[in-house]
Image (cartoon, helix red, strand yellow):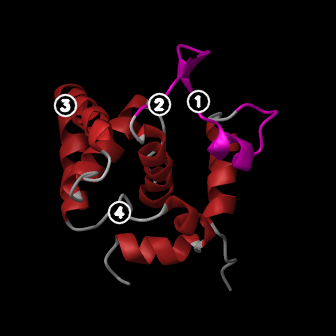
């Protein structure tokens, strides 16, 4: 029988594995933090997110879990193309800029993989219209079924 894992648990493990949060922060502290710390060439650079950017980024991180695309440049090209394919991030206007720029880079640098991710997204849906706190409490398998239009 499959173990039931909440999105919160899976996201916490993902943050640890990918080095997204510092070792001295737990997941709840990272989620409450008003700053993002982006890894740029091995340095953690603090960035103040504007206009709901962090809320969109939190859902974007869950999309990484659900699609299996990692946080390498290639994975970012793929997940952003997938997000555009699923209909984009309508309630998160500033995040559109990230999606478009990253996807365009993917089209230039890795066109085939970016196209396949976009095409996959055309058959699925994203979580950008969902409340992130509600998403955290749901089982990962339940969200997977929702994204794949099986729920």
Q: Residue most toward the right?
A: 24
Indicate which disc residue 49 carries.
2
- Asked if residue 143 lies in the magenta stretch, the reply is no
Q: Residue most toward the front?
A: 51
Q: Earlier in the sequence, mark 3 or mark 4?
A: 3
Q: Earlier in the sequence, mark 1 or mark 3?
A: 1
Q: CA distance from mark 1 to mark 3?
A: 26 Å
- Asked if residue 41 lies in the magenta stretch, the reply is yes
Q: Earlier in the sequence, mark 1 or mark 4?
A: 1
Point out the stretch of residues depicted in magenta: 22-50
Which residue is denoted by mark 3 in the rendering?
A: 104
Residue at coordinates 77% horizontally, 37% vertically from top-left?
25
Indicate which disc residue 129 carries.
4
Looking at the figure, which quarter contains the C terminus? bottom left
**In the rendered image of this protein, does residue 40 appear above or below residue 7?**
above
Residue at coordinates 40% horizontally, 30% vertically from top-left?
73
Residue at coordinates 25% horizontally, 45% vertically from top-left?
81
Mark 3 or 4: the one toward you? 4
């Amino acid at each position: 029988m499959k173990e039931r894992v909440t999105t919160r648990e899976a996201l916490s493990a993902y943050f640890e594995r990918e080095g997204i949060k510092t070792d001295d922060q737990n997941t709840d502290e990272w989620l409450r933090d008003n700053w993002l710390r982006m890894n740029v060439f091995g340095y953690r650079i603090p960035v103040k997110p504007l206009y709901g950017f962090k809320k969109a980024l939190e859902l974007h991180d869950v999309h990484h879990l659900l699609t299996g695309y990692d946080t390498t440049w290639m994975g970012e090209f793929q997940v952003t193309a997938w997000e555009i394919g699923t209909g984009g991030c309508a309630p998160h206007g500033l995040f559109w800029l990230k999606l478009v720029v990253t996807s365009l880079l993917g089209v230039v640098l890795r066109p085939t993989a970016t196209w396949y991710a976009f095409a996959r997204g055309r058959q699925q849906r994203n979580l950008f219209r969902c409340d992130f706190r509600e998403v955290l409490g749901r089982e990962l398998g339940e969200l997977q079924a929702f994204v794949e239009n099986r729920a």
